[in-house]
Image: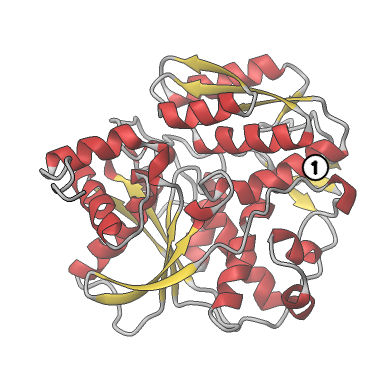
């Protein structure tokens, strides 16, 4: 395998202590990939049944907690039939398990004993769990205001957690400085992470009977779900299994919406914004490092970037729970975005929409308690 720069095109052998190009841009992976969908359908469930399309990591080094093959559930949302992909049913409660499983497997294959990561919560909790499984020490740097539940999960798995005050970019710099030539296992920078995330696209195709949906609606922070859909459905098309690319709809919190701003201005990159703070902490990313790739995915899929208010996110979080889907605000943002498109008449009738619900509500009990209190339903009914 080789790393190739997404900007200048230079390449080098993949190595555990290399996390970006010398020019400062993020890397992509070059490796021989062959997606055999029929073989995958016969293989045991999980992301590794798609191994032909994943980085070539020996089975002995694969670190797994049984991730993948999350449920796809039909429901009605804003009066319209949709499908919800329940990524919060992953082993550690979020979609991050897909990418972390591949990233941790690569790290283990390289004999790395310690990794450093920065995360607002879910990715750090996931990496800590997979490192515990692999016997790798994990140092996690997190924003000072990260959800206590996510940090508790990381600590319980044995990670050393350091909280950093100030903006999200400062947390990343602290982790990069701490890694200092070691293994900076950043889910935002590592191309191995995106390779794992794309497996949800393969599953959607399989769960829908061998066809692509008309649209995939995802919460968007750094953009790995956007890139996962783009890479996964392109691989399906190249394998002759899918005849089209679904529209990719990226949903952001209005208080931190750099991708939506770039889309509105019809840009090919993402200049970045100043975050105003949002309950959807998992998608509060002022400057996505793979911005040009995210925009390319949206333009080429004829997709869209939508921003939703805090009130819309909160309402979606409560309404999803009433349907049985208990998700954190970051995941509810995707459903809020689809509702906004439907209400403004921007959603074609009869289209198959898949909404990805990315993280469990159990990760953010304080925020959901506040939402219920605001709606007057904080206390249960007398009969429980």
Between 182 and 261, the one lying in front of the other is 182
- Residue 278 location in percent, x, y? 30, 35
Most extreme residue toward the front, as rendered? Answer: 383
- Lateral position of residue 221 relative to residue 309, left or right: right
Between 197 and 74, the one lying in front of the other is 74
Instruction: Determine the residue positioned at 33% across, 51% down.
Output: 333
In the displayed structure, 170 sits above or below 39; it is: above
- Residue 149 location in percent, x, y? 44, 30
Find residue 18 and report its image quarter.
Answer: top right
Instruction: Determine the residue positioned at 79% across, 62% down.
Output: 51
In the displayed structure, 49 sits above or below 131; it is: below
**Counting other residues with Cα less than 10 Å from the Cα at mark 1, is it few (<14), some (14-19), or many (20 or more)?**
many
Find residue 7 and report its image quarter.
Answer: top right
Find residue 182 and report its image quarter.
Answer: top right
Q: How many marks?
A: 1
- Residue 317 location in percent, x, y? 28, 51
- Lateral position of residue 57 relative to residue 139, left or right: right
Q: Is residue 25 visible?
A: no
Colouring scheme applied when the structure was drawn: secondary structure
Q: Is residue 341 visible?
A: yes
Q: Check disc 1 and report the residue beneath it.
A: 106
- Lateral position of residue 343 relative to residue 105, left or right: left
* SS category of the residue bearing label 1: helix
Between 202 and 67, the one lying in front of the other is 67
Instruction: Determine the residue positioned at 30% across, 51% down.
Output: 307
- Residue 91 location in percent, x, y? 59, 48
In the displayed structure, 285 sits above or below 347; it is: above
């Amino acid at each position: 395998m080789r790393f190739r720069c997404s900007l200048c095109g230079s390449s080098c052998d993949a190595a555990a202590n290399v996390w970006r190009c010398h020019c400062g841009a993020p890397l992509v992976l070059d490796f021989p990939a062959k997606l055999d969908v029929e073989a995958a359908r016969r293989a045991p469930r999980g992301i590794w049944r798609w191994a032909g399309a994943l980085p070539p990591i020996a089975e002995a080094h694969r670190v797994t907690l049984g991730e993948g093959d999350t449920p796809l559930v039909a429901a009605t949302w804003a009066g319209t039939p949709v499908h919800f992909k329940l990524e919060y049913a992953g082993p550690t409660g979020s979609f991050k398990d897909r990418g972390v499983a591949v990233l941790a497997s690569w790290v283990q294959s390289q004999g790395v004993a310690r990794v450093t990561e920065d995360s607002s919560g879910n990715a750090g909790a996931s990496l800590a769990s997979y490192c515990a499984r692999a016997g790798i020490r994990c140092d996690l740097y997190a924003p000072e205001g990260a959800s206590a539940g996510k940090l508790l999960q990381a600590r319980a798995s044995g990670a050393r957690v350091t909280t950093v005050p100030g903006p999200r970019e400062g947390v990343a710099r602290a982790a990069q400085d701490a890694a200092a030539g070691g293994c900076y296992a950043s889910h935002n920078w590592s191309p191995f992470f995106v390779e794992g995330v794309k497996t949800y696209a393969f599953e959607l195709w399989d769960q829908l009977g061998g066809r692509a949906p008309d649209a995939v609606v995802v919460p968007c922070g750094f953009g790995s779900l956007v890139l996962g859909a783009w890479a996964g459905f392109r691989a399906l098309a190249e394998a002759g299994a899918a005849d089209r690319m679904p529209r990719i709809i990226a949903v952001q919190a209005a208080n931190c919406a750099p991708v939506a701003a770039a889309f509105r201005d019809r840009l090919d990159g993402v200049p970045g914004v100043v975050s105003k703070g949002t309950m959807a902490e998992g998608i509060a990313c002022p400057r996505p490092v793979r911005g040009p790739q995210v925009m390319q995915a949206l333009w080429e899929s004829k997709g869209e970037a939508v921003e939703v208010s805090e009130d819309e996110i909160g309402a979606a979080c409560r309404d999803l729970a009433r349907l049985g889907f208990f998700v954190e605000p970051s995941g509810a943002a995707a459903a809020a975005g689809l509702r906004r498109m439907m209400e403004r008449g921007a959603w074609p009738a009869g289209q198959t929409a898949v909404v990805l619900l990315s993280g469990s509500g159990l990760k953010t009990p304080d925020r959901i308690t506040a939402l219920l209190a605001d709606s007057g339903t904080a206390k249960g009914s007398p009969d429980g």
